[in-house]
Image (spheres, grey):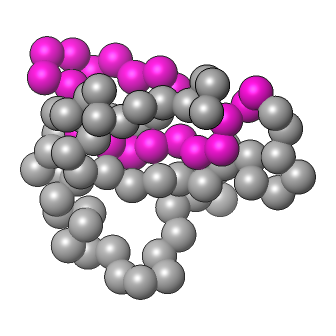
Amino acid sequence: MPGSEHLADYPVEYRLGFVIGYNTKAPEWGRGSAIFLHCKGAKKWNTAGCVSLPEGRIRQLMERLRPGAVIKIASSSK
């Protein structure tokens, strides 16, 4: 699909990760449909709007989350 990412092009970053649902209710074309929580790149933290953490931290999160877990982005902790 035009505009879609090809995750296999990023073997380090997408070795492990999570999908944070985004723009899923009444989606707006061109705004994407997910934000990824993925591994830090081999040499840099840069992302294209995603969130990256060291691979070890991603593994820790995977061990803690259970079926039905939801990751949300919030503007505050309240």
Is residue 68 toward the left or the right of residue 66 in the image? right
Task: Please tell me which residue is depicted at 17% across the width and 39% down the height of the picture.
Answer: 54
Residue 9 position (above or below residue 33): above
Visible residue check, residue 17:
yes
Residue 9, x across and y down, in percent:
29, 26
Toward the viewer: 10 or 78?
10
Dominant secondary structure, magenta: loop
Task: Please tell me which residue is depicted at 18% across the width and 51% down the height of the picture.
Answer: 57
Task: Please tell me which residue is depicted at 17% across the width and 62% down the height of the picture.
Answer: 60
Residue 46, x across and y down, in percent:
34, 17
Q: Residue 32 lies in magenta, yes or no?
A: yes
Q: Residue 4 lies in magenta, yes or no?
A: no
Residue 71, x across and y down, in percent:
51, 61
* Residue extent of the magenta highlight: 30-49
Is residue 58 toward the left or the right of residue 72 in the image? left
In the orientation shown, which residue stands out farthest toward the bottom? 67
Residue 12 position (above or below residue 18): above
